[in-house]
Image: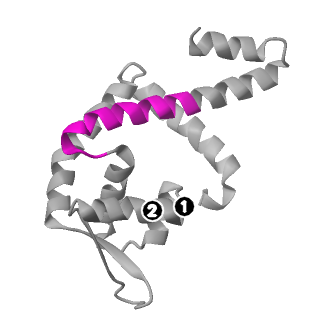
Amino acid sequence: MGFASRLDRLLAGRPPDLIAAVAASRLVFRVAHLMEQRIDAALVPAELAMREYLALVLIADAAVEPLRPSDLSATLGATRTQITRLLDGLERKGLVRRLPHDADRRSLQLGLTPAGRDLLKRAAPAVQAAYRASWKGVGTASTKHAIALLRTVHDTLAPEEAE
């Protein structure tokens, strides 16, 4: 039994507004999972997982303002323990360094090593191709519409981040 038929069976006889809310939510979760699998597959040659890649992108983007592990945690929606493990792995691979923070010596800032910058540069085209392929069947206009809808849901769930 496929995803759609399981969902239909689960929601049978429920009120229409509940069916719509649950079906949309389950589809968002499923699509996110499938996209992560696709991006993980694209990153196999780089020996990275999507979360590692995202961490490298965020650290690389911190040229203006240094990124702290707590910032990375908030952006990725991960616990401190998960971020510590993620950074430990990236450090072991020689891709990231933890450095004393420029302005606050009690905290750390993150930086890419030259190897991290190089790997990110080589991995980015494969990830971008995976993103494009995921949305290709929808088209640009519908993708933009999906972004607007998802932003509205996001802003309802996290109004403090809507700014």
Residue 113 shown left or right of residue 162 in the figure: left
Q: Is residue 115 above or below residue 47?
A: below
Residue plotted at (21% across, 53% down): 120
Q: Quadrant of residue 17?
A: top right
Judged from the image, the secondary structure of the residue bearing numbered disc 2 is: helix
User: What residue would you read off at disc 2?
Assistant: 83
User: Quadrant where the C terminus lies?
Assistant: bottom right
Residue placed most toward the observer, 3 or 148: 3
- Reply above or below: 27 against 64: above
Up the image or down, 152 lies above or below 77; here it is: above
The answer to whether residue 18 is above or below residue 49 is above
Q: CA distance from mark 1 to mark 2?
A: 6 Å
Residue contact at pointers 1 and 2, CB within 8 angstroms: yes
The residue lying at 63 percent from left, 42 percent from top is 152
**Quadrant in the picture for residue 4:** top right
Q: Residues within 10 Å of mark 1 (few under 14, many from 20)?
A: few
Instruction: Answer yes or no: is residue 102 visible.
Output: yes
Helix, strand or loop for disc 1: loop
Would residue 15 be found to the left or right of residue 44 on screen? right
Per the rendered image, the range of residues in magenta is 29-48
Which percent across, then down, holds residue 114? 14, 65
Q: Quadrant of the N terminus?
A: top right
> Secondary structure of the magenta portion, mostly?
helix
Residue 65 visible? The answer is no
Where is mark 1, residue-wise?
79
Task: Give yes or no for residue 33 being in the magenta stretch.
Answer: yes
Tally of numbered tags: 2
Residue 51 horizontal/vertical position (percent):
39, 49
Residue located 27% across and 65% down the image:
91
**Image location of residue 60, percent across then percent down:** 28, 63
* Amino acid of disc 2: Ile
